[in-house]
Amino acid sequence: MKVYINGKLLDEKNAKISVFDHGLLYGDGVFEGIRVYHDKVFTLDRHIDRLFRSARAIALDMPMTRDELIKAVIRTCKANKISNGYIRLVVTRGVGTLGLNPYLCKDAQVIIIAAGIQLYPVELYKKGLSIVTVGTMRNHPEAINPRIKSLNYLNNVLAKIEALNAGAMECVMLNPQGFVAEASGDNIFVVRGDTLTTPPVWCGALEGITRDVVMELAVELGYRVREEVMTRYDLYTADEVFLTGTAAEIIGVGVIDKRSIGKGKPGPVTRRLAERFKAYTRETGTPIK
Ligand code: PXG
């Protein structure tokens, strides 16, 4: 595998970052997870936009322009002959001192890894996920704003630990007010009749790109789509619940906190959206070739 670091494509074993990098020392950096489908990079512009917003939010000066970054992503895919896969784009603050001061970090590091992706097991897309609400809440927006896709994912990792320890592969995270925010690495949607509802980002959700695409496709398919404050009542009483994310795509949830949701397996709306989403991954994207 060839890994891109600051303009160079390096063999995996030579792709190294300093132990003094603030990305490692403090989780000081931002990232994106991007999919490649059928020789095209899916929603690349939206990911680059979000990366630049995350960088701006943490006062990190991006060392490359948008166009340079897009070219670097394509170049990395080409070098690894990726037709279908997953790209991890990481920008760290770079090498600094052992102190916190980010202004002493001069060279932000750009890393691009193009590899495969481990989805949930295929059966789970038919059966539906079983998830639990965890005690670890989403960060307060004036702590680390959940809209920032930062390298500091400890909040999410702690939630994931709780889920896994409870025998679940994903979780529902609430915000500090007790409203539903999202899963540890996915956004959450509720279906009731012909209406899809997802928490607004101010409730502690990442502005998921799959979330955005699903909302757009759902409107095209004639569903009503709302962003509304949600409590667990809305989950437990839903016809269907599903999660969205770059890695997971669209996955139905059958059980939350040991309670069956709807019929206890992915419902017709989830299936229809998943089908439409799959078709959309063929129709759109930035060509690699
Ligand atoms: N919420 C959070 C907190 C995320 O990290 C999503 C929602 C979905 O956003 P997109 O733009 O991908 O539709 C994410 C995405 C994992 C994993 O292992 C997930 C993500 C990043 C890294 C790893 O599940 N996140």
Image: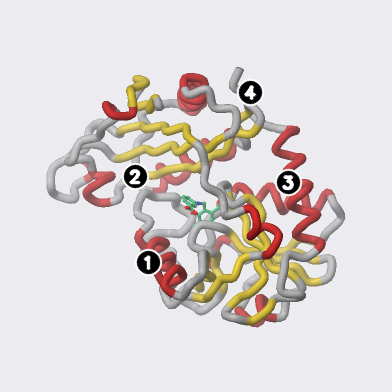
Crowdedness of circle 3 by 10 Å Cα count: few (<14), some, many (20+)? some
Nearest to the observer: residue 49 or residue 238: 238
Pick whichever of labels 1 and 2 is earlier in the sequence.
Answer: 2
Nearest to the observer: residue 159 or residue 163: 163
Under mark 2, the amino acid is: Gly
Pick whichever of labels 1 and 4 is earlier in the sequence.
Answer: 1
User: Marks 3 and 4, how far apart in space?
Assistant: 18 Å
The answer to whether residue 60 shows anywhere in this view is: yes
Under mark 4, the amino acid is: Pro
Seen in the image, is 246 located left or right of residue 128?
A: left
Q: Which residue is mark 1?
A: 158
Pick whichever of labels 3 and 4 is earlier in the sequence.
Answer: 3
Label 2, secondary structure: give it. strand
In this view, 92 is above or below 285: below
The answer to whether residue 67 shows anywhere in this view is: no
Q: Quadrant of residue 157?
A: bottom left
Locate the C terminus and report the quarter of the image it occupies: top right
Seen in the image, is 224 located left or right of residue 186?
A: right
User: Marks 1 and 2, how far apart in space?
Assistant: 19 Å
**Residue occupying image coordinates x 68% and y 62%:** 252
Residue at the extreme top of the image, as rendered: 289
Nearest to the observer: residue 238 or residue 123: 123
**Residue occupying image coordinates x 67% and y 57%:** 125
User: Marks 4 and 2, how far apart in space?
Assistant: 28 Å
User: Marks 1 and 4, how far apart in space?
Assistant: 37 Å
Q: Which residue is mark 2?
A: 29
Give residue 260's position: percent from left, percent from top: 68, 78
Residue at the extreme right of the image, as rendered: 222
User: Marks 3 and 1, how far apart in space?
Assistant: 30 Å
Give residue 46's position: percent from left, percent from top: 58, 39
The residue carrying mark 3 has its beta carbon less than 8 Å from ligand 1: no
Under mark 3, the amino acid is: Phe
